[in-house]
Amino acid sequence: MGISYIYPEFEVVRNTARCIGCRVCEKQCANGVHLFDPELGCMTADDAKCVDCQRCVALCPTRALKIIKNDCTFRENANWQADTIKEIYKQAESGGVLLSSMGNPKPLPVYWDKILINASQVTNPPIDPLREPMETRVFLGKKPSTIERKADGSLKTELAPQLELSMPVMFSAMSYGSISYNAHESLARAAKELGIYYNTGEGGLHEDFYCYGENTVVQIASGRFGVHEEYLSTGAAIEIKMGQGAKPGIGGHLPGTKIVGDVSRTRMIPEGSDAISPAPHHDIYSIEDLRQLVFSLKEATNYKKPIIVKVAAVHNIAAIASGIARSGADIIAIDGFRGGTGAAPTRIRDSVGIPIELALAAVDQRLRDEGIRNNVSLIAGGSIRSASDIVKAIALGADACYIATSALIALGCHLCRTCQTGKCNWGIATQRPELVKRLNPDIGSERLVNLLTAWRHEIMELMGGMGINSIEALRGNRLMLRGINLTEKELEILGISHAGE
Amino acid sequence: MYKRPPLEGEVRIPSGCAISAVISKDGNRFCGEGIIKSMIPMHDRSNGLGGGFAAYGIYPDYKEFYAFHIFYNDNSDRIQCENFLKDGFEIVKAENIPIKKIPEITNVPLIWRYFVAPLSSVLARLQIDEKEYIARTVMRINTQIGGAYVFSSGKNMGVFKAVGFPEDVGRFYRLDEYAGYMWTAHGRYPTNTPGWWGGAHPFALLDYSIVHNGEISSYDANRRYIEMFGYKCTLQTDTEVITYIADYLLRKQGLTLEETASVIAAPFWSTIDKKPEKEKKVYEFLRTVYPSLLITGPFSIILGFEGGLMALNDRLKLRSMVCAEKDNMVYIASEEAAIRAIAPNVSQVYSPAGGEPIIVKVKEGKF
């Protein structure tokens, strides 16, 4: 075992009185935790391999299994906590950079949970969404600063290209490769049914999914994987990915083991080669270069597609967004530091970037101060967990929200945070055919539709309570928000008053 | 130490209200007695914390000049403000607005009236048109000269308002001595009591005036949007922001009254989707371009402007508002009783639908 030995993090608890030895757990676990011991005639488990994805627990027909946190501990130390010690052991052993998946799990402030929503009483009636119309339709894109009229005095109604959303939510970028074919199909079908959009991420667009083009945002990232003319013209919008909330300042890394078959063809790179996208776009070293890429893409698509520029929320985000708003981009997507990822260096994921709540509030205010808020729409992402998070984001100033982690959870993800291993037992973050087929796109898309239908109802209830019957009247309506347990400075940045004020 | 109570604008105060309007389509001028009378049956819709009137066509002798009505806390504010005005305007007349001392109206500030014309040299230097300069001047005085507040700034029209019940405010300003072709009135029921004269309604900018009943739920979305275009919402009231929205859409963006109505009380998407293609395109365009100027929550407003008015309810019609017409006179009020008080024989009183604009214009050349 040796000095670097790390005692298993989880303990597989099997109730032998309930276990019938059906070996379902063994078949379901790609990590090889469960084994049938023919000599003893019973199931055994190697706790060390367990990632706590709950697959075996969920499928055990007799509820004989549970996974619990191991209580074997180091001597308690508030400064040197167990995770820190274990990470040092790992690095002393391997000499490598620590890798993690999904969003930042550290106990940093979640501002959504410190913001409260208003409701009407007496002076203004709440509106009942079951009896009155309640509108959630949103258009994303550049709005003109003046109107023009034809010779006969009627309005010229041509607009810069807009994305129409039935509700202010879109599925955020997750590449084919980082997630499975079936996961992509589920997202694409749900987006179409819901009247919203999903996003290819930087892995290109599988040929089977071109039929969902009207509900697809195609992404261009620094690696330019899978980008060609037809790809650009198929999407409803094009997103230039400058950064990602989980890993600002670095590019993506998809291990060669995931670059197999269709993934390789879709990305247009050889099988088995690591897909490493550079940290910067090598044709964008400054804001004027971004403008050139924006207009190159517009030229390539005859000015018919809105261009989204996605950036990670970093310290100077307001000024960066102001630059992007003047670059010709139609939409800015801001990804907060709690956003998810298929793989990121742990240190970057956990300590680079800022919360989306503060970034969004600062950007929306800056664009208004400069009178250019109409130049762009704003999408906020990076851990939007519920309908009330969405309502708060809209009231802070977002036009729409990106969700990804919540969508994956709807598909079965249990947030075990080991996507980088490619052994996702839920068929989501894997390319192994036997695992991928566990995710049925019929069921997956239905669950996504259910989730967002439920959220839409909740958004309407919350809006109705505020006496607002259209989402436009909520956007930037910060008077509808109050802070709780926040400092003066935090309230100032969020642009809201404290509860009781 | 004494801490003065907060003024309007330092706190946001929701309020309910009564509104009324009378207009002669023939441009006949009539005194303010009728409009005062119409407010009496609606006494209980106000609580004595604000009343006011807007009168159009009352200054025919000075109709080429902007009439500034200004409240001052004291003479030093007046001197400071007048010095500021002299830099940019020719002041052809400056006077106290005549009042009648009555016990119901107390804490009276200095109330002055100026007829002014912007200096052409100043306009040339700033390269803006006359109206824009007036609007900027009003914003500047109201935000930068403490103790001075411009509450009326149009041509051949004027706003008269105070803390008190509307019928008392009307008598206080001797409105029976003015004659106009259109009058609008407002009685206020604020849910808090800062009791500041500037906070009473109508609220006006240039020749646009608004009387409004309701509490809009879209306030901060509207405010934060409109403030991008040089407006400063110093009062934190719905009426103020609605006035700026009207000014922005009508004057700066050049929309028609109907188009303005379908921005601020936009038809529901479900209604738009059923319209014929051409109309649908226009509605869709307006909602897409001005989403942040949609006003939600209950409101009935009467927007007055030179030569006419537009009355509009929120799209769910969450506030009462009725109209009637007789002998080319049009009456609009929160309650039918207000109309019957001055025109008992009107035959048909009708209730406009939510979001349906009622536009009344004086015949061309008659105002």
Image (cartoon, rainbow, N blue to C red):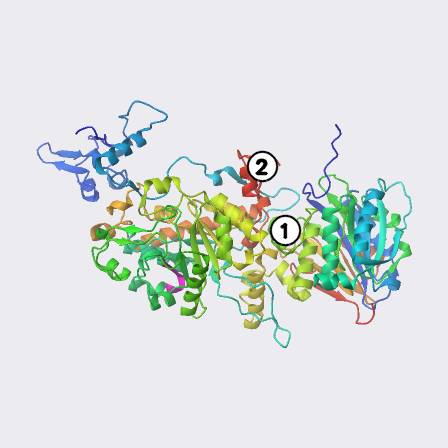
Total labels: the figure holds 2
Q: Residue A169: which numbered mark, if any? A: none
**Residue that numbered label 1 is attached to:** B223
Task: Please tell me which residue is depicted at 33% across the width and 66% down the height of the picture.
Answer: A228
Bin the neighbour count of mark 1 within 10 Å (Cα to Cα): few under 14, some 14-19, many 20 and up.
Answer: many
**Mainly helix, strand or loop, the magenta region?**
strand
Measuring from the top left, give residue B5's x and y in whole percent.
74, 35
Q: Judge left or right: residue B31 versus residue B249.
A: right
Q: What segment carries the magenta color?
A: A213-220
B363 over B75 or under it: above or below: below
In-front residue for pair B155/A162: B155
**Mark 2–mark 1 distance (CA, rounded to whole Å):** 19 Å
Badge 2 amino acid: His
**Residue that numbered label 2 is attached to:** A498
Q: Quadrant of the N terminus of chain B?
A: top right
B275 over B212 or under it: above or below: below
In-front residue for pair B207/A30: B207
Badge 1 amino acid: Arg
Extreme top residue here? A75
Q: Quadrant of residue A93?
A: top left
Q: Chain of mark 2?
A: A
Q: Judge left or right: residue A169 versus residue B260.
A: left
Residue A106 included in the magenta stretch of the image: no
* SS type, badge 2: strand
Task: Please tell me which residue is depicted at 64% across the width and 60% down the height of the picture.
Answer: B355
Q: Quadrant of residue A60?
A: top left
